[in-house]
Each structure stands twice: as structure tokens, then as C-alpha cells.
Amino acid sequence: MADRRLQVFHAVAKHLSFTKAAEALFMTQPAVTFQVKQLEEHCNTRLFERGHGRNTLTPAGLLVLEYAEKILALSAELDQRLKEMTGEVGGLLLVGASTTIAEFLLPQVLGEFKSKYPKVQPRLAVANSETVENRVAEHTLDIGFIEAPSHRDAVSSDICCEDELQAICAPSHPLARLKAAAPKQLMQYPFISREPGSGTREVIDQYLREAKIQPADLNVVMELGSPEALKGLVATGLGFTILSRAAVLKETRLGQLVRVPLSPRLIRNFSVVYPKEKFRSRVVNTFVQFARERLAALQAS
């Protein structure tokens, strides 16, 4: 229901890039440029300064952005509340999830939810926990599922389910012979780590500090941004990693990788985060309840 020009302007203002805004909106760049130009003509002022390869908001642009966020949020709330007067659960559902949750747990949950509520249009954005939380705070996602505690004042968070992290190695690795591995034992071997900003990495670093080990003291041979990449490298025998047990169920059943519990066990919480002080639609509340139940069941299996 909101003015399309305002929607396009908002995307450009958040990305400070016409190209990235076009990608996010599934539009061509000339179409994005045209919409912004139309809004500038309507406002009778420039909203962006364009030069030296970067875009910045003018004072008028900053003012328009402030009101655009309020207008777009109210417009979305109005659309949703009108739909809910009919009693249906439907509409666009923008979900973000950190890599482990998105790759190994959430697809099944989203598929089952879509089957139960066919009028819902889910879209899943995958990134590390930090990025997902930032996008929820920016109101570009309705909800996010993250692997580490929330750090943003602009979001609210609730625990969704538990997850256990374990040492993962090739069958030929010395760790594979252990029933459990203490933190000090891990320091003897090359370690393949997740990247900074990863919820998994944050939880592991905190676990090590509690065991009086500085993360920098580990023999880190490589940092990777994907659990799939980590598993592939670990299978070569180059080193071990620490991952969610849910991420390696298939490989351990096939005998390609070995899971070694940590001692003490490393249990973390998966959390769901929402924008603070924002109306939560029926579809969001329904999905969160559904996802909590299904994720807990999947983790227990």
C-alpha cells in the first residue's frame, strides 16, 4: 500500500548503493534510479549526493529516510491487520537465519509450515548471526534465528531450543579415538575455525575462555565461513573443527566424519530475535511457535 518510490528510496538509503538496492528489490538498476529521481522531483530537492564512487544522503534525504521507515512500517502493519480480519494466516514472511540453522534445520521447518499455511510466502536470508541480527534491527527481516546471544538493544530475543557443539574430525585423526575431549587436549592439534561474526565461533571462544584457554592460543590453520566448507576440509585430515552435531549427522552415519563430545559438554541456545516495539503479525507469531516446536523436536531426534 505504501508509495513504491518510497520503498525504492528506502532500499537505496539503507544500502547506499543503487546496484545493491536493485538486487534486493529484484529490479533493474535503471528502474531504481528512475523511482528515486521521481521522488526527488516530488520533493523538489536532491536526496542523494552522488560522486567519487559512493552515495551519501543529503540532509533532506536523512529526513525523508526517517519518515520513510515510519510510513513503510505502518503500511505493512495496516496490510497485515486487514488480512488478519479475515482470519487467514498468510502474506510475506521474511526470515533470517545463521548458517547452521539455515542449512541443516530450518528448510524442513519452512517446508512443513508452507504446507500447513499455503498462503504464506516465506523468504529465507542466510548469513552469520551478527548480520542476521543487524538486519532484524534494521527492520529488513521480520524475525531471525541466531546461534549466539543477542547483542543489539534494538531487538528482543527468546530462547528457541538447545544445540550441542562437538569436536569433528576425520576417522583417522587422533581425536577420533577419544570418548570425550577436554579443552586442553584440543590445543595439540590444528584447528579449522569459523569466521569472525559467526555465532558458532563466539560460543566456542567463550567456552575456551571459561576453561582458562585463550582462543588465540589454538593452532588455527584456516578460517571458513560455511559449515559445509569446514566439513569438507576436516574430512581431508588437515585438522579438526567444532560444529553443531546437527550439521554432521549424515557424514557421521556414513563414516566420513567422527563426532567427539567435549568435556565438559558444550551446550548453547538457539535464539529467535524480533525488532523491538514493532507489531508482530499473526503469521510471524504463528511461525515462531511452529518453528520452536519443530526445531526442538529435530534437535531431540
Image: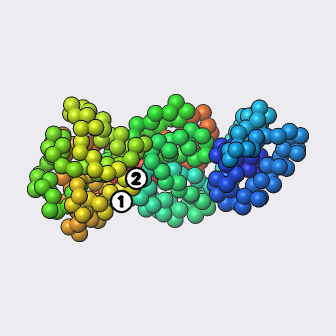
Location of residue 23 (image quadrant): bottom right
Near-viewer residue (48 or 285): 48
Q: Is residue 180 visible?
A: yes
Give, as a three-letter code, the residue at label 2. Gly
Badge 1 density bin: few <14, some 14–19, many ≥20, Cα 10 Å: few
Q: Is residue 10 visible?
A: no
Tell me where residue 133 appears, x and y as whole percent.
50, 41
As drawn, 29 above or below 53: below
Dot 2: element: loop
User: The C terminus appears in which quarter of the rendering?
Assistant: bottom left
Amino acid at dot 1: Ala
Residue that badge 1 annotates: 229
Q: Name the side, left or right, on which 196 lies relative to 256.
A: right
Q: Residue at x 77, y 32 (%)?
A: 59
Q: Is residue 9 left or right of residue 274?
A: right
User: Is disc 1 in contact with disc 2, using a CB cutoff of under 8 Å?
Assistant: yes
- Say which residue appears at 24% left-offset and 63% top-offset: 236
Judge by depth and name the residue closer to the eye, 211 or 162. 211
Q: Position of residue 61 (x, y in %)?
A: 76, 37
Residue 30 x %, y %: 76, 59
- Colour pattern: rainbow
Q: Which mark is residue 225?
A: 2
